[in-house]
Each structure stands twice: as C-alpha cells, then as structure tokens.
Image (spheres, rainbow, N blue to C red):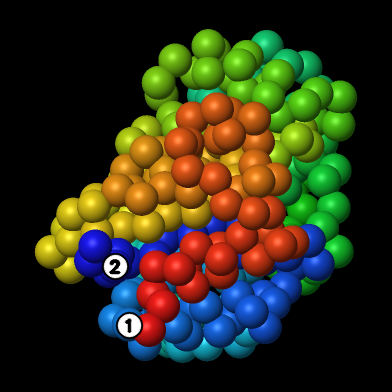
Amino acid sequence: MTSPRLVATDLDGTLLDSTGSITPRTRRALDLARAAGAEIVFVTARPPRGVDRITPQTGEGGVAVCSNGAIVYDTATREIVTSRTLDPAVAAKVAMLLSETMPGVGFAVETGWNVLAEPAYDRILLFDQEYRRDLPGLDSLWDSGEPIVKLMAWSRGHTADDMLAVALAAVDGQAEITHSGGTGLLEISAAGVTKAGTLALLCAERGLAPQDVVAFGDMPNDLAVLAYAGLPYGMANAHPLVLESVPNRTLSNDEDGVAVVLERLYAR
C-alpha cells in the first residue's frame, strides 16, 4: 500500500497532549512522515497566533489551515496566504438571530490577528489577552472595519452541543456553524467555509486526491475533514459524534495516538 502523501491533523485534543504540547514521540513521528515525502498540514480552529505558539515544537514550517478553514497560513514566513471572511452585514444578522433564540449570548470577532469583543463576551483566555480589544457594544464589532474571519458566540449557561442545535435552525444556512468542545462556544464562518473545503483546495493545488490523505481529529469541526480523507482516524478521546462517524480509531492524544498511526504508515 502506498503511504499517504499528506497528513492533515487537528491540534488541540489530537496532535497536542492535554498540556498543549507536542511529545517527543509525536515529533519523531512527524519527522518520519516528512522523511518519507509526506506533507504535514495542521487543520485547526486556532488562529495563526495560536499555531505560532506550537510550531517550534513540530519541526519544519509549512502550511496550516486556520480558523476552521477561513485562513491558509504559512507557518515559516508567518504570513496569511489566503483569507475568506464573513460579511459584516451577515455577521450582524446571525448575531441578531442567535441573540433572539439564546438570550445572554455574547459575541466576539476573530480578525486573523486579533480578537474584538463586546461587553457580554466574558470568555477570558489568559494567553490571548494581549490580542484582545474590548469594544463598547455589539454594533462596534461590525463597524470596526476589521475583517471578520470568524464570529464567536459564547454562553456560560449552555453546552456547545445545545447551542449548535438551536443555532443551526435559526441561521438556516446563512453561515457555517460548528464547535470545538463541550464549553458554550460556537464558531461561525462564512457560508461554504470549512476545514474540509480549504483542505480540498490545497490538495487540488498539489494534484492530490482524498485517497492521498490521512487525517486525524477529535471534535465536530473535524468531521468534514475526516469524511474527506481517504484514511480518517478519530482519537480515542474524541467527541461522541466523531466516534460514531469515523470507522478508524487510534489512541488518545495523551497516548500519542497520531504518532502510533504515523509510525505504522511510514515505517522504514
């Protein structure tokens, strides 16, 4: 069997362990795949600055699909190659619909480089504070003139799964909505913008087909990537939807699950 020519992997809960680090074994496995001629592509909800924090641990620079597919990022040059943004008018309409169906939800905008937050968005990430700009009200998000790479909706009183069900019905295809875990955070992109769609474009540029791709993921926002790849793996620690949908399983992120598969696929 020919080894996959591209490795598409999520980061949090997948390639990274629970401390947010690349273990030595996983680093060696990435190097093994590269030595065999495979390209490593990170496919993540993280913005570019979040990828920058871990690339020194992963070896060579390369391409990352960031912000759930909205950004293609060159990790070596730290440049955004392409960006597909959400129209401010659409973002404002989506926020209005979600506010009506889920009172108390707060909103923030990911610009690619920074986060703009309105007062109700009280989700605090200490490592991201230097990139956060607090604005006086919801309309300020749309009037800022900044690109909207991703709209984020946050609630302390709801799970992400519960929010997603309500949001999909309310928005009705006007934007892409997904989430990365159990906390009350939804991630909203322009219609048609997904991790899988952007990965497919990268593969087409390289003359690669789905069967040339091995993919790893753990959360609902990884499902489309796992459906696209010819060889998909769900992590043992994955969300129930992933475990139900993906036929292949590897060990958890804390057990070097990605490395276990890469070692087998690219063994010399």
Decide which of tag 2 and tag 1 comes sooner along the chain.
2
Q: Quadrant of the N terminus?
A: bottom left
Left/right of residue 34 with respect to residue 253 in the rendered view = left
Q: Is residue 204 above or below residue 217?
A: below
Find residue 251 and report its image quarter.
Answer: bottom right
Where is residue 242 drawn, in percent x and y?
Answer: 56, 35
Asked whether 199 or 96 is in front, the reply is 199
Q: Residue at x 42, y 54 (%)?
A: 215
The local crowd at label 2, few if under 14, some if 14 to 19, many if 20 or more residues have their Cα within 10 Å, is some
Where is residue 190 drawn, in percent x and y?
Answer: 41, 38
Residue 36: assigned label: 1
Q: Is residue 125 visible?
A: yes
Say if mark 2 contacts mark 1, CB within 8 Å: yes
Q: Residue at x 34, y 74 (%)?
A: 39
Left/right of residue 15 with respect to residue 93 in the rendered view = right
Where is residue 214 drawn, in percent x and y?
Answer: 37, 57
Question: Dot 1: what SS?
Answer: loop
Residue type at mark 2 is: Ser
Q: Is residue 32 above or below residue 88?
A: below
Tell me how many marks there are.
2
Asked whether 150 or 145 is in front, the reply is 150
Q: Quadrant of the C terminus?
A: bottom left
Question: Dot 2: what SS?
Answer: loop
Residue 262: assigned label: none
Residue type at mark 1 is: Ala
The local crowd at label 1, few if under 14, some if 14 to 19, many if 20 or more residues have their Cα within 10 Å, is some
Q: Residue at x 54, y 13 (%)?
A: 170
Left/right of residue 71 with respect to residue 188 in the rendered view = left
Q: Which residue is mark 2?
A: 3
Q: CA distance from mark 2 to mark 1?
A: 8 Å
Of all residues, the one furthest to the left in this rendering is: 207
Q: Is residue 53 above or below residue 237?
A: below
